[in-house]
Amino acid sequence: MDVITPGSLIVAVIAVIVVGAVFGGRRLRAKPPSRIYRCRSCGSAAHHDARTLEAWRRGKTVFFCQSCHRQWRRSQPPRQRDSESLATGGGSGCLGVIALVAALPLGLLWAWLQA
């Protein structure tokens, strides 16, 4: 039975961090299959912009052009948007991931020292 050495443990942790960074970065840069979409409201063809790209990355499949989106926003009560963002947390979770990445090697080191 092989014993895990500190060197192999460190290499494994670094490999997991690098693989996570590579695949996590690809997900952030993902683009929809087509640069053009049809507005669900008026049916006009429009190019994806930052707003629609972010919606696509969040899993939305229906998009609205700028003018239809602007019209929809004007029809919404101003406080509704603020309460929705507070209810969902509004954060991306990066701080939690960084804390986990920092704590994982320390926890493994502590476990190794206890063995």
Image (cartoon, grey):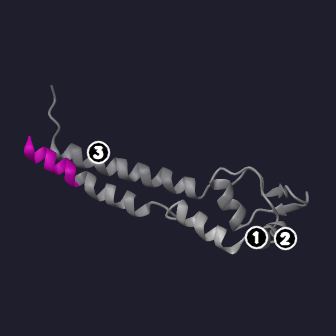
**Count of picture labels:** 3
Residue projecting furthest to the top: 1
From the image, give the main secondary structure of the stretch colored magenta: helix
Where residue 109 appears, as percent x and y from the top left, is 16, 50
- The disc at residue 73 is 1
Q: Which of marks 3 and 1 is in front?
A: 1
Q: In which quarter of the image is the N terminus?
A: top left
Vertical arrangement, residue 101 with respect to residue 11, above or below: below
The label shown at residue 103 is none
Earlier-in-chain disc, 3 versus 1: 3
Q: Residue at x 67, y 58 (%)?
A: 55
Residue span colored magenta: 106-115
Q: Residue at the location (84% across, 63% down)?
A: 46
The reply to whether the magenta stretch includes residue 110 is: yes
Q: Residue 43: image x %, image y %?
A: 91, 57
Q: In this view, does 67 lie to the left or right of 1?
A: right
Instruction: Judge whether 108 appears above or below 44 on screen.
Output: above
Residue 10 falls left or right of residue 58 = left
Of badges 3 and 2, nearer the viewer stands: 2
How many other residues sit within 10 Å of disc 1, few (<14), some (14-19) or many (≥20)?
few
Q: What residue is rendered at 34% in x and 48% in y?
A: 15
**Res. 80 image quadrant:** bottom right
- Type of amino acid at the residue the image marks with label 3: Ala
Q: In the image as oriented, which residue stretches furthest toward the left?
A: 114
Counting residues from the start of the chain, the first of labels 3 and 2 encountered is: 3
Q: Which mark is residue 12?
A: 3
Q: Name the residue under label 2.
A: 67
Where's the C terminus, which quadrant? top left
Q: Residue furthest right?
A: 43
